[in-house]
């Protein structure tokens, strides 16, 4: 059976820019546009030329894309003016884009209150604007704003707005759930009715996520007949966001009921790039990626419960609805107080630590994990500390150095300037070493002191650095316990996370710092035995 063509329209750089705290630079938009083009989306909406210098410059600099159609966004022409006498509309029309998407009122209430014109004048604006776009040889589409609210208030008028756009030559009429309040069953019923008047091959859907139904509403509209779906990367957008393309695209390409019915411009072999685009947007916005994001999140295929892990080892599909690698992700087996032997064995195998499944050390590792989690540790996301714990139980971790003591002093000059100084006493190869460090805080100072003079280990640790530091108070009151998690990276780009727990934040931090250094030495294969002269 021949599959129907379904078109993917990305509006991250326009709808996404309406998100609180988001302000794309021209360079940011260039990077995003290139990534979306390479992925294979059909339309990339670049913004509103003429509305602000950034969007205008972006269109002028980019010019076009290899496969996707660069789309300019704007409003229909003003009532009472010709197209040529509307400077704002002409800026949109003159933008170097292959397609133009205009927002138009389709709710008679808004035509009256927001525009202050008659229903007929609004329809004339839609028709004239579409005709002007097609006369330039560009693809025209109309976003029918508040379509679902307008349909419920005055069905005939909402339909007449959509029909006017089609009759004037629009390639697409996009039905917009602008306030995100429509439910999936309503979307399906309304779209089904619209397809009796306008072919689904000319209809699109644009949903917002105010009821956490944007993806569900998009799928409902597709099932009802629309053949263009709009959304943003990571669901970025005003208020609660827009339909998340990072969830929609894998669903459309992999899920039964969609994969066999539709084809898109995105080759299934390129599907792993969806994760890269998701991470690219987070990087541009300086945001921490959502670990629990469907398909692409670090925890999307993470398994923790012992029974679950055992089942996954026998049949991954038991708890994984798609193969992790199909979306550029990987399976993660977490080790925690919910774990069983399967968790430990899989985690050791992932770390390339070979061990017999019958080794008594497995029980000791599992028992220590559960005991330490009772004290406040959590090994879910701190693989390095877990590996060190396991290696110690397996008696495979070298004794690189011993810490015999440390001190931290904090001074303030009364003028707002604070200085932290730390000293660490170590024994390396039987020799006592005193490391000192200063920093902008006690943890930074301790880090500098610990790594200040590690003798022959210096070469291995010189390029590592601390890039993230998180503190959590596990309970309150006089017996509060502090959990510290730190992330380190080195010159290879490898990163690892370690943990420390103690009522004293400095002690907890130092434990995590020490593990970070020891893990770096271990992973680099550094020997703890002094080299002898040949």
Image (tube, grey):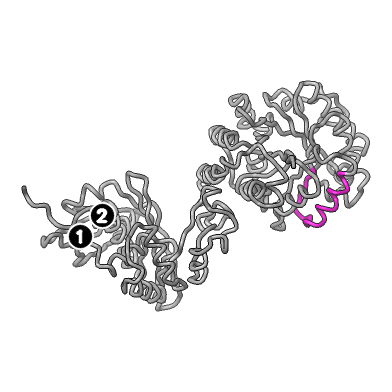
Is tag 2's residue or tag 1's residue first in the polypeptide sequence?
Answer: 1
Q: Residue at x 67, y 39 (%)?
A: 264
Q: Mark 2 touching mark 1, by CB under 8 A? A: yes
Of residues 148 and 194, which is closer to you in this image?
A: 194
Quadrant the N terminus occupies: top right
Of residues 438 and 266, which is closer to you in this image?
A: 266
Q: Residues within 10 Å of mark 2 (few under 14, many from 20)?
A: some
Pointer 2 residue: 521
Q: CA distance from mark 2 to mark 1?
A: 8 Å
Q: In which image quadrant can residue 50 be found?
A: top right
* Magenta-colored stretch includes residue 177: yes
- What's drawn in magenta, residue-wise? 175-195
176 above or below 354? above
Left or right: residue 493 versus residue 96 is left
Q: Residue at x 41, y 76 (%)?
A: 374
Pointer 1 residue: 400
Left or right: residue 359 versus residue 327 is left
Q: Residue at x 60, y 58 (%)?
A: 321
Whole-percent x and y of residue 464? 30, 49
Q: Secondary structure at mark 1?
A: loop
């Amino acid at each position: 059976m021949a599959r129907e063509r379904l078109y993917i329209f990305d509006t991250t750089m326009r709808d996404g820019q309406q998100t609180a705290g988001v302000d794309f630079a021209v360079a940011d938009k260039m990077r995003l546009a290139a990534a979306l083009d390479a992925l294979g989306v059909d339309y990339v909406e670049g913004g509103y030329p003429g509305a602000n210098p950034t969007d205008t410059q972006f269109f002028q600099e980019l010019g076009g894309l290899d496969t996707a159609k660069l789309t300019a966004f704007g409003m229909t022409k003003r009532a009472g003016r010709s197209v040529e006498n509307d400077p704002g509309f002409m800026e949109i029309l003159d933008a170097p884009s292959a397609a133009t998407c205009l927002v138009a009122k389709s709710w008679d209430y808004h035509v009256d209150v927001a525009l202050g014109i008659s229903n007929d004048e609004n329809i004339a604006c839609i028709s004239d604007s579409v005709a002007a776009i097609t006369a330039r040889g560009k693809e025209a589409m109309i976003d029918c704003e508040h379509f679902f609210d307008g349909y419920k208030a005055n069905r005939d008028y909402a339909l007449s707005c959509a029909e006017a756009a089609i009759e004037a030559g629009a390639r697409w009429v996009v039905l917009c759930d602008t306030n995100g309040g429509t439910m999936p069953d309503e979307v399906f019923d309304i779209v089904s009715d619209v397809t009796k008047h306008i072919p689904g091959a000319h209809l699109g859907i644009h949903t917002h996520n105010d009821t956490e139904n944007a993806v569900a509403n998009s799928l409902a509209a597709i099932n009802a007949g629309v053949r263009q779906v709009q959304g943003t990367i990571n669901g970025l957008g005003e208020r609660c966001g827009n339909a998340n393309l990072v969830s929609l695209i894998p669903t459309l390409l992999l899920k039964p009921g969609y994969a066999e019915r539709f084809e898109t411009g995105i080759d299934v072999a390129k599907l792993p790039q969806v994760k890269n685009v998701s991470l690219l947007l987070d990087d541009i916005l300086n945001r921490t990626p959502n670990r629990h994001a469907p398909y692409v999140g670090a925890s999307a295929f993470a398994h923790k419960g012992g029974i679950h892990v055992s089942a996954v080892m026998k049949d991954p599909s038991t708890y994984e609805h798609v193969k992790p690698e199909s979306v550029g992700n990987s399976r993660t087996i977490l080790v925690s107080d919910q774990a069983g032997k399967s968790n430990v064995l899989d985690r050791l195998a992932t770390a390339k630590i070979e061990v017999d499944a019958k080794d008594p050390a497995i029980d000791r590792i599992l028992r220590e994990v559960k005991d330490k989690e009772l004290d406040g540790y959590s090994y879910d996301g701190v693989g390095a500390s877990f590996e060190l714990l396991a290696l110690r139980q397996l008696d495979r971790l070298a004794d690189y150095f011993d810490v015999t003591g440390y001190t931290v002093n904090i001074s303030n000059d009364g003028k707002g300037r604070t200085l932290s100084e730390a000293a660490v006493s170590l024994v390396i190869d039987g020799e006592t070493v005193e490391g000192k460090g200063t920093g902008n805080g006690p943890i930074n100072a301790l880090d500098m002191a610990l790594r200040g003079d590690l003798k022959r280990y210096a070469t291995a640790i010189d390029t590592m650095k601390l890039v993230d530091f998180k503190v959590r108070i596990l309970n309150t009151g006089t017996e509060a316990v502090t959990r510290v998690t730190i992330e380190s990276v080195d010159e290879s780009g490898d990163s690892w996370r370690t943990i420390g727990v103690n009522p004293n934040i400095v002690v907890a931090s130092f434990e995590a710092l020490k593990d970070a250094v020891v893990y770096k030495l271990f992973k680099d294969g550094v020997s703890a035995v002094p080299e002898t002269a040949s």
